[in-house]
Amino acid sequence: MTAERVEEVTVELGPRAYQVLVGSSLLHLTGPRLASLGLRGRCGLVTSARVGALYRAPVEASLRAAGFEPTVVELPDGEEHKTLATLERLYDGLLAAGLERRSPLVAVGGGVVGDVAGFAAATLLRGIPILQVPTTLLAQVDASVGGKTGVNHRTGKNLLGAFHQPCGVIADVDVLRSLPRREYVAGLAEVVKYGLIGDPGLFALIERNLDALLRLESDLLVRVVAACVRQKAAVVAADEREETGARAVLNFGHTVGHGVEAVTEYRRYLHGEAVAIGMVAACRVSQALGLCAPGLVARVQGVLGRAGLPAELPAELRGPQLVAAMRTDKKVAGGKIRFVAIEDIGRTRLVELASSEIVNQL
Ligand SMILES: NC(=O)c1ccc[n+]([C@@H]2O[C@H](COP(=O)([O-])OP(=O)(O)OC[C@H]3O[C@@H](n4cnc5c(N)ncnc54)[C@H](O)[C@@H]3O)[C@@H](O)[C@H]2O)c1
Ligand SMILES: [Zn+2]
């Protein structure tokens, strides 16, 4: 028997600091949280059709009970709608609702809703507050924290955007129960990533309790999501605008992962699945460079495989196309890729490699 847990993580950013609440049954806190920040009156509730059908009502009720007058805007679901056109419709809805400079937005949804609503909040009336209520595992451990917002351009993902920190984040793990299984498992890849890049205790916890994690056991999920958020918060606090290089560690598994997504035209793998392949690849490259012990690859593959994630780069994807795709990834510096290698569970090291050097090791 354990009491229900709520964990609170602070993202230490001086005047832009904010709290991330991680727990279960938290949606009713949306209104009171915003009110406690001194906000009131009109607000925008941005969600998607699918997520709105499930969770709009309790959030709206909480806002009304706290004295807010919410205007709901539902965006279409899916990455293909993370566009300027969707953003413009969102502006239309929010401006028609008469939002003002201190009117907050509440974003209830996955990373797509969070990124689009975040960009609207960054730009509407030159910036209004936004509370993120992430509803996918990926959004809870990654997208909702850190202030990166934006939409895609037809020539590339996330090319239009801004840094705009939220005024708070409410991560309710209960909502993950309605996520399609595959989306949830893909999010677990990012969770494993946090263990690998900086938290051996988290990695061990996942290894020991993977079955319970796959059953979405509430207490465990709260612990695990909070551990991830704590790490993301620390990295963001050290490098808010991706300038010092500290934030680069979050890219572990993503060089090859992004390459795999690109060569399969974003159709075959969910992001987390490609990252799983990329993390195993990063371990292999690290081993070939003599940076980590040989047992690491198998251990990482073991966890990812048990979770139901792909843990091997399919042979047909190893080739010049992957080399080219990795070269166009935005993390390239001076023709080389700044590659996040791993020394041991919880310890990474940046190395500069040519993309062919990476692919040759796989
Ligand atoms: N801003 C950042 O720092 C950051 C970081 C990582 C990723 N991202 C962005 O996040 C996006 C991916 O986010 P995502 O993986 O959350 O995908 P998503 O927002 O597309 O959500 C995935 C699917 O799950 C559905 N869904 C969401 N919550 C649900 C719930 N609780 N129950 C049932 N269905 C639910 C959505 O409608 C959607 O169909 C990408 O656009 C990526 O660029 C941003
Ligand atoms: Zn990722």
Image: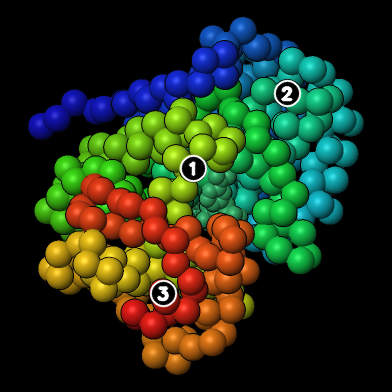
Secondary structure found at label 1 = loop
How has the structure been colored for display?
Answer: rainbow
Say which amino acid is labelled 1: Gly
Marks 3 and 2, Cα distance to the nearest angstrom? 43 Å
Residue at 50 percent of width and 29 percent of height? 169
Which residue is label 3 attached to? Answer: 358
Q: In this view of the protein, can residue 49 be seen by the observer? A: no
Which of pointers 1 and 2 indicates the residue nearer the eye? Answer: 1
Marks 3 and 1, Cα distance to the nearest angstrom? 20 Å
- Residue 332 % position (x, y): 57, 61
Give the mark, 3 or 2, whose residue is nearer the N terminus.
2
Q: In this view of the protein, can residue 314 be seen by the observer? A: yes
Residue at 49 percent of width and 73 percent of height? 355
- Residue 210's tag is none
Which residue is label 1 attached to? Answer: 245
Give the mark, 3 or 1, whose residue is nearer the N terminus.
1
- Residue 215 % position (x, y): 25, 55
